[in-house]
Image (cartoon, rainbow, N blue to C red):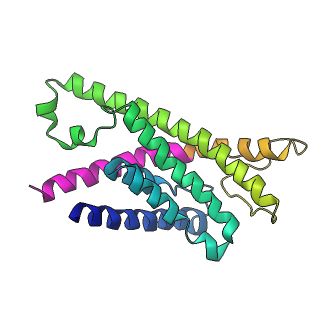
Amino acid sequence: MRKIIGSFIFCIAGALLNMFVYWIFITIMGLPLYLDTIFTITVTLVCGPLWGVLTGALTNAHSFTVYGWEYYLFALCNIAAALITWFFIKLFPLELNLNMYAANTKSVYQSGSRRLSAWMDSFIVLTLLSFALCLVISILGGCISVFIGFFKAPAVNPAAVQTMFHHNIHMLPNEILSRIPINIIDRLISAFAAFGVALAVRGLMKKIHR
C-alpha cells in the first residue's frame, strides 16, 4: 500500500513538473521546446508503465479548461512517450537498468572499461529511444492537429517549423514533417534528462530504505 501511495504522489509530482517545464520553456523563455514528457519518462523508468501513462494523461489535464476538449487529445502523445519508454525497457533491460547504476558500480563491474562500455550502451539506447519518440510523437501530433482542424482552427504550434515546407504540401504530411526537426532536439533532451533524474531518484530511494 505504501508503494502505491508513493507511486501516486510521484506521478502527481511528475505531471506538475511536466507542466512547469513546459511553462518555463514556452511561456517564459519563448523557446520552441515543449519538454513536457521528461517526467513522464522518468516516472515510467522508476515506477512502470501504468504510472507513466497516468502521468502523461494528467500532464495535459489543463487542456480541458484552457484550450477546449479537442486539445486534450495531445495527451495521447504524452501517453505514447510512456508506452514507448516501457517498450525500450523491455527491449533493453540491462542498458536501462536503474538498479545497476544505483548500486555500487565497483561490485557490478570489474574494470573501468566495462563501466565505460555499460554507459556507452545506455547512451546508444537512449539515443534510439529519443528518435523513436520523435517519430511516433511527430506522427501522432500531426494527426491530432489535423483532426482538431475539422472542429476549429488549430492553435499555432510553437514546436513546429511551419515555413520549412512548400505551402502546397498536403496538410497531414506538413503537420507531421514540420514537427520532426524540433522534436529531434526535444526528445533527445527529454530522454537523457529523464534517465538522469530517474537515476537520482532511484539512488535516493535506496538510501532512504537502508
> Image point 62% across, 72% down: which residue?
64
Image position of 146 (left or right of 62):
right
Relative image position of residue 97 (x, y in whole percent) = 29, 38
Is residue 44 magenta-colored?
no
Q: Quadrant of residue 123?
A: top left
- Label total for image: 0
Residue 158 appears anywhere in the view: yes
> Image point 60% across, 68% down: which residue?
27
In front of the other: 185 or 133: 133
Hey, which residue is sitting farthest left in the picture? 210
Relative image position of residue 67 (x, y in whole percent) = 68, 71
* 17 versus 91 height, above or below: below
> Image point 13% across, 24% down: which residue?
110
> Image point 44% across, 43% down: which residue?
85
Hey, which residue is sitting farthest right in the picture? 168
* 125 versus 144 height, above or below: above
* 205 versus 64 height, above or below: above
Secondary structure predominantly adopted by residues drawn in magenta: helix
Quadrant, the N terminus: bottom left
Relative image position of residue 54 (x, y in whole percent) = 45, 60
Q: Which residues are magenta?
A: 186-210
Hey, which residue is sitting farthest front in the picture? 1
Hey, which residue is sitting farthest bottom in the picture? 65
Relative image position of residue 175 (x, y in whole percent) = 75, 47
